[in-house]
Amino acid sequence: MRGYPVAVPKDASVLLEVDGFEVAISNPGKLFFEQAGITKLDLVNYYLAVAPGALRGVMDRPMALKRFVNGAAGEAFFQKRAPASVPPFVHTVELSFPSGRTADEVVVSNGAALAWVVNLGCIDLNPHPVRASDLDHPDELRVDLDPGPGVPWSMVRDVAVVAGEVLTDHGLTGWPKTSGSRGIHVYARIEPRWTFGEVRRAALALAREVERRVPDLATSKWWKEERHGVFLDYNQNAKDRTVASVYSVRPVPDARVSAPLLWSEVPDAELGDFTVKTMPDRYARLGDVGAGIDDAVGSLDGLLELSARDEAAGQGDAPWPPNYAKQPGEPPRVQPSKRRMPDPAAAPTDPKAPRGRVGSVAPAMPQPPARRADGTAAPTGRRRSTHPLIVISQAKAKRDAMAGLERWKKRHPRAAKLLAEDDVLVDGMRGRSSLWYRVRVNLRHVPEAERPAAEPPDPDYDPWSEYRERPPGGS
């Protein structure tokens, strides 16, 4: 049974038979995408309609559960640990994280398990790049193209084509797919004989090579304030990073899908063409256009040789995400706007990066533990900014962070009018089990004399307060 033939009461349950197993779908009539009119059962039926392709993207991979229990418009939370009780068709495997913690994560290997995780509220699927049989050696290199604010979709497509060429030139086959949000992913199957660190090195080398070939379009710079165009996020290949898999539905109003593409489709592909409502027909007509990925296993040797040449030329490692231990050879892990003693004579590393002057704006506000009660910084707090970048808001929900930005604009209308689209930086920050949001603005287009001073963030959410406030032994 793939669906339900009549109108379904919101609080009913439906029992589906999938791959010889019974899967209960609770609240099948609950709207998960209000604008598109898509219910939870519609979402389950979509995944079952494209199940062979969707399973190819997650097969035997541990998966972090990103649960939207209140639908796409609600806040998601991450559940790394599998529920205490799972049905017999769902497997688990113990995964270790950079923090030293371990957790039994869900492994999806059949259609019944696929329907089961969607019933938990998982709109998109977020597998690790390893198989349960070998958790230390990824078999997938992931190229994540992340456009900055205001970057046109056509530029993302152009950079994807170049990324595919770089992969081919170094002995790998790239398989493109839309991210379902604003970007493109290009995956390459690799032999599972390299560590996470080596796969990340290869991804960094690829990002730098793409940047060299199209410097006006692409960047490998980690810090947002240094970027322009399309960022190639090499850190998505670090251990414990997950990416929405192929055929995943994304939590956007029109229920777009991370759709696999033929390379011939990339130059003209439009994100809005691939949704929960359109993909089943495309799949029925074309089949899974990414079906050959498992037969196109390649070697990282070419990219690692490129990495070695970069290192010999003075291009060493690049910054890691903040929750990772400091790595040998990694440059100082501090963003340019907070460097203690910038060299004013040094040439900028990226001619398109926003500029600032030392002391051109009041220092960014420290995080809550480093501030006085009145919001001012102690002398040992944050350093003065080399870029005119200030924190506006920190909130648990994105809408609250953006509301704080609107209040700031009302307080400073002159400065707000001078901001370019890419002067507003909205960061999704990953906490212990959920995302929180930070908004910053770059005042590079505001005359120095008119730049507002940094203020305490409004709102001023502290994602770690609930853990600090728990009594000893509390859960």
Image: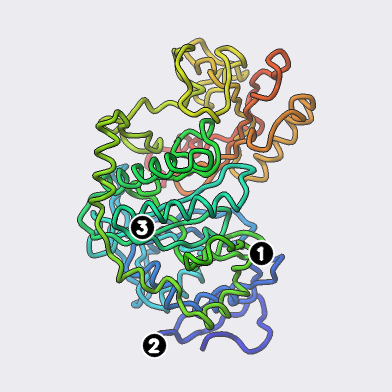
Q: Which residue corresponds to the image point at 35% horizontal and 59% vertical from the top-left?
A: 188
Task: Tell me if mark 3 has few (under 14), some (14-19) or many (20+) residues whose alpha carbon lies within 10 angstroms of its own.
Answer: many
- How far is the residue under mark 3 from the one under mark 1? 26 Å
- How far is the residue under mark 2 from the one under mark 3? 27 Å
Amino acid type at image mark 2: Gly
Q: Report helix, strand or loop for mark 1.
A: loop
The mark closer to the camera, 2 or 3, is 3
Residue at image mark 2: 20
Q: Relative to 341, does residue 85 appear above or below in the rendering?
A: below
> Where's residue 133, x and y in %?
23, 65
Disc assigned to residue 254:
1
Q: Report helix, strand or loop for mark 3.
A: loop
- How far is the residue under mark 2 from the one under mark 1? 32 Å
Residue at image mark 3: 128
Q: Relative to 6, does residue 429 appear above or below in the rendering?
A: above
Amino acid type at image mark 1: Asp
164 or 150: nearer the eye?
A: 164
Q: Is residue 425 left or right of residue 66?
A: right
Q: Report helix, strand or loop for mark 2.
A: loop
> Where's residue 183, x and y in %?
54, 53
Note whether residue 98 is visible: yes
Q: Relative to 98, does residue 116 appear above or below in the rendering?
A: below
